[in-house]
Image (cartoon, grey):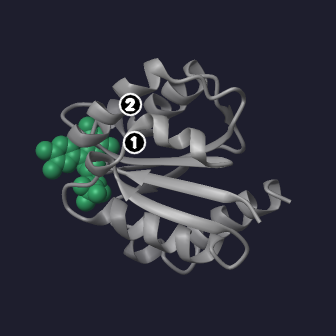
Amino acid sequence: MKKIIIVYGTTGGNTEMVAEVVAEILSKKHKVDVKRAELSSAKDILKYDVCILASPTYGHGLLEAHMAKYVKGLKEVDLKEKPCAVIGLGDPKYEQQYHIESAPILEKKLTDAGGKLLLPALRISMTPVMHLKGFIPHWTKQLLAKLQ
Ligand SMILES: Cc1cc2nc3c(=O)[nH]c(=O)nc-3n(C[C@H](O)[C@H](O)[C@H](O)COP(=O)(O)O)c2cc1C
């Protein structure tokens, strides 16, 4: 059993919904804490075996505001090859060139801090509701397999 932290930023609740579904599946085999970015700090990651960061995309290809603040703290942290994963959300109706740009931004922040990505990001386009029973559990099971 591993200790996993999922930190998310959200404005409209979509990212929270995805984080909760992923946490529910992971918690059948692991100990999972889910935290809002504004109530957590990057150095908390050091207390966990695995870290998952989740953010929607806002403002022409940027992270959600609380997550943007949170990741600044990663500059002070050495993740020492800690296993990590990323969840990004977006909607192509905003700006196609920045569609789900939060995913590569978070991946870079984690790898720059020394984290090791376990698998490609979970990328959710538009509402996550239609993916709650398909794509999201499918990705989470791939993640579970990497944690064996
Ligand atoms: C003002 C605004 C700007 C947005 N900009 C982008 C964007 O640049 N790229 C993208 O893929 N999605 C963009 N989105 C879509 C959101 O990322 C998407 O709706 C997401 O599911 C919201 O997540 P949340 O409910 O957790 O806040 C934008 C949404 C709003 C309201």
Q: Name the residue under label 2.
A: 71
From the Cβ of disc 1, is ligand 1 less than 8 Å away?
yes
Q: Distance between the residues labelled 2 and 1?
A: 17 Å
Q: Which residue is drawn at 65% across and 62% down?
A: 139
Q: Residue at x 31, y 64 (%)?
A: 14
User: Quick check: 106 left or right of 141?
Assistant: left
Q: Residue at x 48, y 42 (%)?
A: 44
- Closest to the observer: 93 or 70? 70
Q: Callout 2: few (<14), some (14-19), or many (20+) C-alpha neighbours within 10 Å?
A: many
Q: Where 37 sits versus 23, above or below?
A: above
Disc 2 to disc 1: CB gap under 8 Å: no
Q: Where 6 sits versus 69, above or below?
A: below
- Closest to the observer: 5 or 144? 5
Give the residue type at disc 2: Val
Q: Report the residue that reaches farthest toward the front.
A: 47
Q: Quadrant of residue 2?
A: bottom right
